[in-house]
Amino acid sequence: MRIVGLTGGIASGKSTVSNLFKTHGIPVVDADLVARDVLKKGTGGWKKVVSAFGEDILRPDGEVDRPKLGQIVFSNPVKRQLLNRLLAPYISSGIFWEMLKLWMKGFKVIVLDVPLLFEAKMDKWTKPIIVVWVDPETQVQRLMLRDRTSEDDAQNRINAQMSLDLKRTRADIVIDNTGSLEDLKEQFQNVLFEVTKPLTWTEFGLSIQGAASVLVSIIVGVLIFRKVYSTGSL
């Protein structure tokens, strides 16, 4: 099974590319959707985040107020790193199980849509890595238009992420999304041809290594959690 890594930046058009894969019959594991699931009320991720950030981040129904939590972490790098550390084991576990289900269904190609692909070091077990890129000015303008936010707020949210220029240097395939939707679709056809080709031996090895790496990380995370929990219970 070929595991394709898809990433980009906020307002770069990554979600549009993700949807194009879906419309062409290629399943996508969306890390953002997995992250929403692990933050649902009562889950392990929910308990960790509420313990760390307090009940002020909760809505009246007890669910996490995601926009409010986002404002907190986007403006504070330390808290953003804390949130990522807390949720990483749960998100990795969720992604692994989604991949496993797709493999059992017989899919030969899957796409991992992960905004923090490089930061979470998931790039090590995806091939090829696709980065959806736009120039900085276009990114700011699209984010302001999409979220009806100020230029300063848009720039701060963009600065909280790894720059697209840096991401593109680490990509196998770069999709330039500064043009029209038709331009994007034309580039996508070339990408689709590349990712549906038969696996090379290198890619086959990466797919096996990737699955093993995720499984090991989940096991280690569970063992650490149990150790911390046991120590705290004494």
Image (spheres, helix red, strand yellow):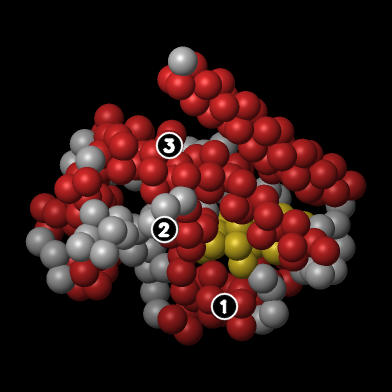
Disc with the residue nearer the chain's start (1 vs 3):
1
Residue 89 is drawn in which quadrant?
top right
- Residue at 64%, 37% in the rendered image: 218
Give the answer, above or below, for where 188 lies relative to 158. below
Q: CA distance from mark 1 to mark 3?
A: 31 Å
Disc nearest the viewer among 2 and 3: 2
Residue 211 is drawn in which quadrant?
top right
- Mark 3 neighbour class, 10 Å CA radius: few under 14, some 14 to 19, many 20 or more: some
Residue 141 in sight here: no
Q: CA distance from mark 2 to mark 1?
A: 28 Å
Front in this rendered view, residue 145 or 181: 145
Q: Amino acid at mark 2?
A: Lys
Front in this rendered view, residue 46 or 234: 234
Q: Where is mark 3, residue-wise?
A: 86
- Circle 2 SS class: loop
Q: Position of residue 234 (x, y in %)?
A: 46, 15
Q: Residue furthest right?
A: 201
Q: Position of residue 100 (x, y in %)?
A: 75, 57
Residue 75 in sight here: yes
Q: Amino acid at mark 1?
A: Leu
